[in-house]
Amino acid sequence: MNRTLTLAALALCAAVSAQAQVRVDDPWVRTTVPEQKSTGAFMAVTSAQGGKLVSASSPVATSVEVHEMKMEGDIMRMRAVPSVPLPAGQRVDFKSGGYHLMLLGLKQPVKAGEVVPLTLVVEDAAGKRENVDVRAVAKAAP
Ligand SMILES: [Cu+2]
């Protein structure tokens, strides 16, 4: 590795350690039509030290569940899971067809361009919980 790259890597490490241990990339929420009471929230979550996502909440929904979607035979099923493992330093995708957050009991329709606040609760190996505030943008599809 040349000297420039080394310095850049050091600067990046410093920036990460000064912030929270959990990083969230590209958060978004799927827009809804009138009368629709639930929708999905998607993002990529990376925990520097490892841990698990145990719950989430949002002021726009009565509750937020952590869901997993997977094929059972030839049927795609969605179910609530108690937590999602976040291996140290590994990006975990919350996306359509896999893990996602389900916003239930929407108080009003989610319109394109709106910013939807979400709070993720991440628990580390020692059982210590950290709140991670996320501002997800509403859009119709990725
Ligand atoms: Cu779901």
Image (cartoon, helix red, strand yellow):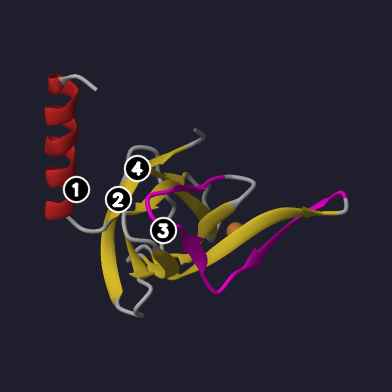
Q: Which residues lie in the magenta part?
A: 74-95
Which amino acid, by three-letter code, is at mark 4?
A: Asp
Q: Nearer the viewer, mark 3 or mark 1?
A: 1
Give the CA distance from mark 4 to mark 1: 13 Å
Residue on which the image places disc 1: 16
Q: Residue at x 51, y 64 (%)?
A: 84
Q: Nearer the viewer, mark 4 or mark 1?
A: 1
Q: Nearer the viewer, residue 34 or 74?
A: 74
Q: In this view, does 10 lie above or below 136?
A: above
**Kind of element beneath mark 3:** loop
Q: Which of marks 3 and 1 is nearer the N terminus?
A: 1
Q: Earlier in the sequence, mark 2 or mark 3?
A: 2
In the shown orientation, is residue 25 left or right of residue 79? left
Residue on which the image places disc 4: 25
Q: Which of marks 3 and 4 is in front?
A: 4
Give the CA distance from mark 2 to mark 1: 9 Å
Residue on which the image places disc 3: 108
